[in-house]
């Protein structure tokens, strides 16, 4: 069967304004060619992020009504805790308002000057929270991850040899914990194999270093294991998820990804002394331990989302629709990062637009053109985002990409067909695209607010 049929019916609809090319050209000019400055209502298909953008199910909306907003001892917390523990059987489950709040608390306890925290690849908020404490964040992806065109079933894996070498060189006392991001977001949404999780865990535990999963896309990762790793085809996703977490000592989680919720997160761990400290910090910055930074109704929505996200019909549709977009773009000759990951397709703007040098922002030029041409909003991940150096100079990022992140359960296959058409049409007239320049930028995180003009 070629058609990906969405394993759900649509009960509530949100109209999309069918803008014209002329309108979009005017709006993006008014926004100084920054896609973050656009009103979301002026976007036809919004692929800026898959974070917090999922559609909730009728069961989740119904669960909101059961939210108990008691300050302490809310039964909504019990339901949340039970749903988390069914998948991630850690002793202490600490709710937070989103993933980065869990990171902030974890690294306030474990980080600090002189400490080094390895990962396959740290997500940017994780890295920022580690560095904020004075600790160092080190990425140890496998060698294959450096080649965008190279196919590998588990390109998110960590280089276990380099991990062991790092722990030996520094001594385990300087490595308070090791992270493993599943799937590896910054590496293109690439999965990590069970064999790799197990091997990383073995090395960590041999030296007494706890292993934490950055678990944001745990269900997508588990489904890739089922599809690609020998021995897992007949295991249920629930069993695979439990096995993944059985090798870890804790995790940080953003419910805005595989929680199928619009807000939320948690820190889960086994160590009692760390859990005590974490709850103390939680009360300072997030809230009482039975609600964290959330309302009781949010905890209910997450509890139901965690049941739905491991549904294999859902995961088959989810992964198939991302692969579908990637496969059609590859067939049309569009350069993309390979293989296609779980939550996004990354267009290789530098390869597509060789006539635009990196310091004229090929990723930005492509992202703007996708919007003007078809109302599709993606996100530049390249020289605009990473080019400004701390000494004030500017240099090309490692790659110039445009990420098309697919929200969960929001768009149908015909929306994806439309996205493919838009990208292919822009690709066919790629020689007409012009470079851009920045006319104003803030001192840090310039991609959110910078103003652009055409060269
Ligand atoms: C989104 C994300 C986070 C941070 O979660 P927030 O809920 O956005 O704070 C951390 N790690 C990874 C891999 C993520 O994708």
Image: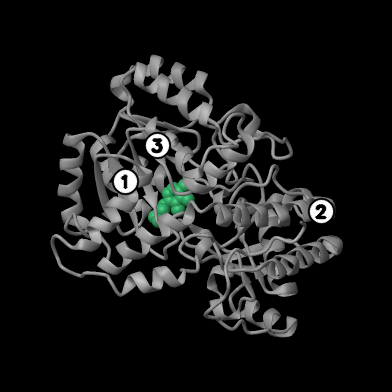
Give residue 218's position: percent from left, percent from top. 47, 45
User: Is residue 429 shown above or below 390?
Assistant: below
Residue at position x 57%, y 36% in the image: 156
Q: Considering only order in the chain, which callout, 2 or 1, is on the residue closer to the N terminus?
A: 1
Helix, strand or loop at label 1? It is helix
User: Is residue 85 shown above or below 48?
Assistant: above
Mark drawn on residue 204: none
The residue that disc 2 covers is: 355
Asked whether mark 3 lies closer than 8 Å to ligand 1, one says no
Helix, strand or loop at label 3? It is helix
Q: Distance of mark 1 from mark 2, alpha carbons?
A: 52 Å
Q: Which of marks 2 and 3 is in front?
A: 3
Q: Give the class, few, some or many, for how many residues have Cα within 10 Å of label 2's Cα (few <14, many ≥20).
A: some
The answer to whether the residue labelled 2 contacts the one labelled 3, judged by CB atoms less than 8 Å apart, is: no
Residue that sits furthest to the front in the current view: 234
Q: Is residue 422 visible?
A: yes
Residue at position x 63%, y 64% in the image: 6
Residue at position x 28%, y 21% in the image: 173
Image quadrant in which the C terminus is located: bottom right
Number of numbered callouts drawn: 3
Mark drawn on residue 245: 3
Give residue 288's position: percent from left, percent from top. 16, 58
Q: Quadrant of residue 399?
A: top right
Q: Which of 372 and 7 is in front in this view?
A: 7
In the displayed structure, does residue 321 sit left or right of residue 254? right
Image coloring type: one colour
In the displayed structure, does residue 158 sit left or right of residue 262? right
Mark drawn on residue 85: 1
Give residue 360's position: percent from left, percent from top. 70, 56
Give residue 74's position: percent from left, percent from top. 18, 63
Q: Distance of mark 2 from mark 3, alpha carbons?
A: 47 Å
In the displayed structure, does residue 440 sit left or right of residue 352? left
């Amino acid at each position: 069967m070629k058609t990906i049929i969405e394993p759900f019916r649509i009960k509530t609809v949100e109209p999309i304004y069918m803008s014209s090319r002329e309108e979009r050209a005017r709006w993006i000019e008014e926004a100084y060619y920054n896609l973050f400055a656009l009103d979301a209502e002026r976007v036809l298909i919004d692929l800026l992020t898959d974070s917090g953008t999922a559609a909730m199910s009728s069961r989740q909306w119904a669960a909101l009504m059961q939210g108990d907003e008691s300050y302490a001892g809310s039964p909504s917390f019990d339901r949340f805790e039970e749903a988390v523990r069914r998948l991630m059987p850690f002793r202490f489950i600490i709710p937070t308002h989103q993933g980065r709040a869990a990171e902030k608390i974890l690294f306030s306890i474990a980080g600090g000057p002189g400490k080094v925290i390895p990962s396959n690849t740290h997500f940017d908020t994780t890295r920022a929270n580690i560095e904020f404490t004075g600790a160092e964040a080190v990425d140890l992806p496998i060698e294959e991850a450096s080649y965008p065109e190279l196919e590998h079933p588990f390109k998110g894996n960590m280089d276990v040899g380099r991990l062991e070498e790092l722990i030996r060189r520094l001594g385990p006392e300087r490595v308070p914990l090791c992270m493993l991001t599943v799937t590896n977001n910054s590496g293109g949404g690439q999965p990590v194999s069970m064999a790799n999780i197990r091997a990383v865990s073995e090395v960590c535990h041999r030296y007494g270093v706890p292993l934490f999963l950055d678990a944001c896309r745990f269900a997508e990762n588990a489904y890739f294991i089922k599809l690609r790793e020998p021995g897992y085809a007949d295991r249920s996703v629930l069993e695979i998820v439990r096995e993944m977490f059985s090798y870890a000592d804790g995790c940080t989680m953003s419910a805005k990804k595989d929680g199928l919720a619009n807000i939320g997160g948690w820190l889960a761990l086994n160590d009692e002394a760390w859990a005590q400290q974490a709850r103390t910090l939680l009360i300072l910055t997030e809230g009482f331990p039975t609600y964290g930074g959330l309302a009781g109704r949010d905890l209910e929505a997450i509890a139901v989302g965690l049941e739905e996200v491991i549904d294999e019909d859902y995961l088959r549709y989810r992964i198939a629709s991302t692969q579908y977009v990637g496969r059609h773009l590859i067939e049309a000759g569009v350069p993309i990062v390979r293989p296609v990951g779980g939550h996004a397709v990354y267009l290789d703007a530098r390869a597509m637009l060789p006539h635009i040098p990196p310091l004229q922002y090929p990723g930005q030029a492509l992202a703007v053109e996708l919007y003007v041409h078809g109302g599709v909003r993606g996100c530049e991940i390249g020289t605009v985002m990473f080019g400004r150096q701390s000494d004030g100079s500017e240099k090309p990022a490692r790659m110039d990409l445009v990420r098309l992140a697919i929200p969960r359960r929001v768009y149908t296959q015909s929306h994806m067909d439309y996205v493919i058409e838009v990208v292919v049409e822009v690709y066919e007239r790629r020689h007409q695209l012009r470079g851009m320049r920045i006319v104003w930028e803030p001192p840090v995180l310039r991609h959110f607010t910078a103003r652009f003009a055409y060269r």
